[in-house]
Image (cartoon, rainbow, N blue to C red):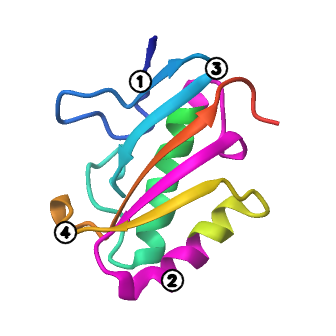
């Protein structure tokens, strides 16, 4: 196992790693829509928050030599299922034609009033 850490995504506040690699896979811990440079939640809209959480996932994957196009499985934790359509649209805009396996889990509450948290598993290696 190898630990992945980058200052391009928020550093962990608890006892966990941003990601671990093992067996050709990258396991990315749940990412809130927190901006790495300021520590602030990125915007109030679900769209802004999905985009920031995915940007954090992308930064961590890049540090592991992977990318969003190598995502295999994504879990999205959402604070309000009424926001799901807008969250899904933002997710689709970011990922384009790539459609990894996915689960959506409604939860309450998320830290800092965040509307979404995203964790992922990706194939290791250079993005295609």
Marks 1 and 2, how far apart at CA = 30 Å
Crowdedness near tag 2: few (<14), some (14–19) or many (≥20) residues, C-alpha within 10 Å: some
Q: Nearer the viewer, mark 4 or mark 3?
A: 3
* Farthest-out residue, right: 128
Query: Given contact means CB atoms under 8 Å apart, are the residues at marks 1 and 2 in contact?
Result: no
**CA distance for labels 4 and 3:** 34 Å
Q: Earlier in the sequence, mark 1 or mark 2?
A: 1
**Mark 3 vs mark 1, CA separation in Å:** 17 Å
Q: Is residue 83 magenta?
A: yes
Question: How busy is the neighbourhood of tag 1: few (under 14 within 10 Å), some, or many (20 plus)?
Answer: some
The 10 Å Cα crowd at callout 4, few under 14, some 14 to 19, many 20 or more, is: few
Please tell me which of labels 1 and 4 falls first in the chain.
1
Residue of label 1: 5
Residue underneath mark 2:
86
Q: Residue 107 in the image: state x and y as whole percent.
A: 25, 68
Could you tell me residue 88's position as x and y percent? 55, 75
How would you rate the neighbour count of disc 3 (Cα within 10 Å): few for under 14, some for 14-19, many for 20 or more? few
Judge by depth and name the residue closer to the eye, 61 or 80.
Answer: 80
From the viewer's perspective, tell me whether residue 59 is left or right of residue 34: right
Give the residue number, with chain letter if any, for mark 4.
Answer: 113
Q: Which residues are magenta?
A: 62-90
Question: Of tags 2 and 3, which is closer to the observer?
Answer: 3
Identify the residue at horizontal 45%, vertical 71% (top origin): 48
What kind of element bears circle 4?
Answer: helix
Task: Classify residue 74 as left or right of residue 110.
Answer: right
Q: Which disc, if any, is residue 24? A: 3
Label 1 sits on a secondary structure element that is loop
Q: Is residue 120 above or below residue 101?
A: above
CA distance for labels 1 and 4? 25 Å
């Amino acid at each position: 196992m190898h630990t992945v850490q980058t200052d391009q995504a928020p550093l962990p506040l608890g006892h966990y790693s941003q990601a671990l690699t093992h067996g050709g896979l990258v396991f990315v811990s749940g990412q809130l829509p927190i901006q790495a440079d300021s520590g602030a939640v990125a915007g109030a809209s679900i769209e802004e928050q999905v985009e920031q959480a995915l940007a954090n996932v992308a930064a961590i994957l890049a540090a592991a030599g992977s990318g969003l196009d190598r995502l295999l499985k994504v879990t999205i934790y959402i604070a309000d299922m009424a926001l799901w359509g807008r969250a899904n649209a933002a997710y689709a805009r970011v990922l384009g034609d790539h459609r990894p396996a996915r689960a959506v889990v409604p939860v309450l509450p998320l830290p800092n009033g965040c509307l979404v948290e995203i964790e992922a598993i990706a194939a290791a290696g250079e993005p295609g």
